[in-house]
Structures are given as C-alpha cells and as structure tokens.
Image (tube, grey):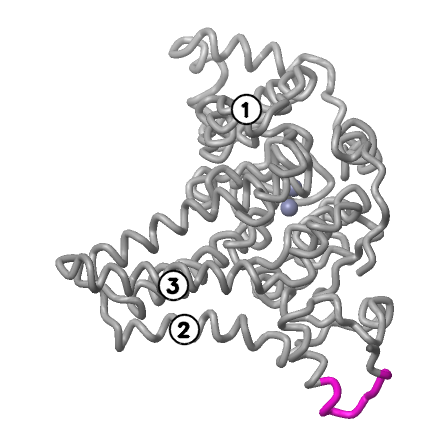
C-alpha cells in the first residue's frame, strides 16, 4: 500500500510513526528527502529521545553492582559490535566470513541500537568519499560540533538507506530485512535483559536487582553512553589528536579516543588506509577491536583479516620522521640552546635520524583521487560473498 505524498501535518506524523517499525516506508521517495535541506524529523526521533529519557528511570530503580557491571560490560561488548561489525566488516569488508556468519554479525551489531548495518555502512562510506567536504553529513568543520556528534542523525534526509550505493550488501535479502525492520533486534535485546533481571530477582535475590533496574542500566544507560562513545568518532576524531598522514580531511589519531572506542581513535590511520582490519598500525597503538577480531579468526568464524601494506607503513615512518624534525626545528627556534648540536650530544642516534630525514627528498602526500575511498576491490570484486549473484531485494 502506498500513501500519496502530502504536506499536511497529520500524514507526515503518521508516516514518521510507521517508519519507527519499517524504515523503508518512504512514500514520498528517497530522492525527495535527499533533495531537502537538513531539518529535524521530531516524530522519527521519538525512539531516540525515549532512549535518552529512559536513563532517568535510574531515579526510581536505583542501582546495584550487578546492574552497573552489566551496563559496563554491554558497553564494551557492543562497542566491539559497532567497530568490528558495522565498521570493519560491513563498511569496509576488512575480513571475510560465511553468509550465515555475515547475518549473525548483522544481528550482533543490531544490539548496539544504531540502526541496521546497511544504513550504517552506507552513511559511513559516504563519509569517506566526502570527508570534511560540504557533502559530508557529519563534519564538525562544515556543520559544527553538535551537528556532527548528534544532530545529523535527527535530519530527515539522513534517515533513508541508499541501497544503490551499497549493492555488495543490498543483494542479500536477509541483511535488507534486518535493515528495514531495524527495531526488531533492539526490542528482542531489551526484552532479554529485562527477563534476565526478573529471573535474577526470584532466583538470586542476593544480587539485589530486578527487571526494571537491569533494563535501565543494561539497556537505556549502556546504549545511550554507547551512542555517544561512537559519535565521538564523527565529532572529536576530526578535531582532537595528531595527524600522522596529511589526508585530504582533518582526521586525527588519539589514544584516549582509541580506549573509548576500542581502537577507532586511530582515525587518521584509518582515513589514510581503510582496507586493513587493524587501525592501530603499531603495537603501541592499542586497538582492542583488532585483537578481538584476531581471536575470533582463530575459531574459523571469520578469516582473511587484511594487514597494513608495507608501502603504508613506509609512508607512516616517513611522516613520523618528518614530524620529529619539525618538532626539533620548532624547539630549536623557540629555545636556541636546544639546537641540533645539543641534541646530538644527548641523543646522537635521534639527531642523526632527524638530520637525515630533513635532507631526504620530500614525501609525496596523497591526493584526494589517490585515496582508497570505498575500496571497490573489497566489495564488488575481491570479496567472496560479493561475487555471488543474487536477485535484487524487493524492498
Ligand atoms: Zn572520519
Ligand atoms: Zn571507515
């Protein structure tokens, strides 16, 4: 059944309500929404507002150690789902799995309550194509901090999934189904948490928890914090931290954000090379998602994790040396006593490297056109599942 387009308030409100349950119910057509300027769709955002408002229930349900630890555990487990599944599998295909495995990854990622994997991947690939350009849906440089952090997901034009741009994923009907009815997994997940709390109240009263309390901490609080932890990647990682690679955007590397997001803080590394599974390129760049995926690969559930090419590591080494030299030159300018001569006395090896790098030929920085962008070879060509021919989705 199709509802005719209407500008009157009630039908639009009704459509927004239906879209809570069927994200692909877009009677006016996706193109019409994409042509609109950004504006908040309040009806569509009500579940998101309820998610935040649900945290206030803590005033009535109180807390218990088991409830708080459940919230913390579910934050990190589901951050792993966001970074390891939504991002490193569906958005970039940095490793392989079976078709059943892929479906299970999408279900697991759905518990993060960040809509379907296909919506997530579509927007993320779009971000890489247009990073910090006016087209970028969530650039803090173009739209400001709060829009990049939370505002962009409230905009009507950002709700639809453009299946035509993610054909490698959209050809799997089961993934389209999960994406279209993206509230199913969160509802089942919240029901499971509540049920566990009810059972615990009766079978283990010593835990001092119950269904409402576990739901408040394990679902509402944990999911809300998880959303803002993930959103840091859109906002803070294009503002805070260091830039190793001179990419055409303003992506940055930050250890603090890497802890909050289980490795996604190495965002400048990732913008330079998106096709590898790990985002921390060195052992000291802590990347817990990569370690988790590595462990998962030992079970045979996933395989073919992509490594960082030597050419990218060489480029990183040149960039790090250039940064060392620039820092030394700045120090020498501001503090003449600490010149290269002084450095040579204290750290002869470091001085030799700095001088050698300073006199080396200029590093060639990547142009926008050289960027790996979406990595067509990862999805359309090289990925085993992507080569399968399936009928187009009927959604
Ligand atoms: Zn980015
Ligand atoms: Zn990415």
Mark 1–mark 3 CB contact (< 8 Å):
no
Q: Which mark is residue 221?
A: 3
Q: Residue at x 85, y 83 (%)?
A: 5
In 3D space, how far apart are the residues under numbered discs 3 and 2 (Cα atoms)?
Answer: 8 Å
Is 193 situated left or right of 341 in this image? left
Q: Earlier in the sequence, mark 2 or mark 1?
A: 2
Q: Position of residue 355 (x, y in %)?
A: 58, 12
- Disc 2 CB within 8 Å of nearest ligand 1 atom: no
Please tell me which residue is depicted at 86% across the width and 83% down the height of the picture. 4
Q: Which residue is mark 2?
A: 54
Quadrant of the rendered image containing residue 382: top right
Nearer the viewer's eye, disc 2 or disc 1?
A: 1
Q: Residues within 10 Å of mark 3 (few under 14, many from 20)?
A: many
Residue nearest the observer in this picture, 59 or 367: 59
Q: Quadrant of the C terminus?
A: bottom right
Question: In percent of the image, x 58 and y 20: which residue is there?
Answer: 321
Residue 274, magenta (yes or no): no
Give the residue furthest to the left: 206
**Local SS, label 1:** loop
For residue 126, above or below residue 294: below
The residue carrying pointer 2 sits among few (fewer than 14), some (14 to 19) or many (20 or more) residues within 10 Å by Cα, namely some
The residue indicated by pointer 1 is: 300
Locate residue 209, reporting x and y percent: 22, 63
Q: Ligand 2 sits in which quadrant?
A: top right
Q: Secondary structure at mark 3?
A: helix
Q: Looking at the image, which is closer to me, 258 or 249?
A: 258
Q: Residues within 10 Å of mark 1 (few under 14, many from 20)?
A: few
Start-end of magenta stretch: 4-12
- Residue ID at (64%, 24%): 306
């Amino acid at each position: 059944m199709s509802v005719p387009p209407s500008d009157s308030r009630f039908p639009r409100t009704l459509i927004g309500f239906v879209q809570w349950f069927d994200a692909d119910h877009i009677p006016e057509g996706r193109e019409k929404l994409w042509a609109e300027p950004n504006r908040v769709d309040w009806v569509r955002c009500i579940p998101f507002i309820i998610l935040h408002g649900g945290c206030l229930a803590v005033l009535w349900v109180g807390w218990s150690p088991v409830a708080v630890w459940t919230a913390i555990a579910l934050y990190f487990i589901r951050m792993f789902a966001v970074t390891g599944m939504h991002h490193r599998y569906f958005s970039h295909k940095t490793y392989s799995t079976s078709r059943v495995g892929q479906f299970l990854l999408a279900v697991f990622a759905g518990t993060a309550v960040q809509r379907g994997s296909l919506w997530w991947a579509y927007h993320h690939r779009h971000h890489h194509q247009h990073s910090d350009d006016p087209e970028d849906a969530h650039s803090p440089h173009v739209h400001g901090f709060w829009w990049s952090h939370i505002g962009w997901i409230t905009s009507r034009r950002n709700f639809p999934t453009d299946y035509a741009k993610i054909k490698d994923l959209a050809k799997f009907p089961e993934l389209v189904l999960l994406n279209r009815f993206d509230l199913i997994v969160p509802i089942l997940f919240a029901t499971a948490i509540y049920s566990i709390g009810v059972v615990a109240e009766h079978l283990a009263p010593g835990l001092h928890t119950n269904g409402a309390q576990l739901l408040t901490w394990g679902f509402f609080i944990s999911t809300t914090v998880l959303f803002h932890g993930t959103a840091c990647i859109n906002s803070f990682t294009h503002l805070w931290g260091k830039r190793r690679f001179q990419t055409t955007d303003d992506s940055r590397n930050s250890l603090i954000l890497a802890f909050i997001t289980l490795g996604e803080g190495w965002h400048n590394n990732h913008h330079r090379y998106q096709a590898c599974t790990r985002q921390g390129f060195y052992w000291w760049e802590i990347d817990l998602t990569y370690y988790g995926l590595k462990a998962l690969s030992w079970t045979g559930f996933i395989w073919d994790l992509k490594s960082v090419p030597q050419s990218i590591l060489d480029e990183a080494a040149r960039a790090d040396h250039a940064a060392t030299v620039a820092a030394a030159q700045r120090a020498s300018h501001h503090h003449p006593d600490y010149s290269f001569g002084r450095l040579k006395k204290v750290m002869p090896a470091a001085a030799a490297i700095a001088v050698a790098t300073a006199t080396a030929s200029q590093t060639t920085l990547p142009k926008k056109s050289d960027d790996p962008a979406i990595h067509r070879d990862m999805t359309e060509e090289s990925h085993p599942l992507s080569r399968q021919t399936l009928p187009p989705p009927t959604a």
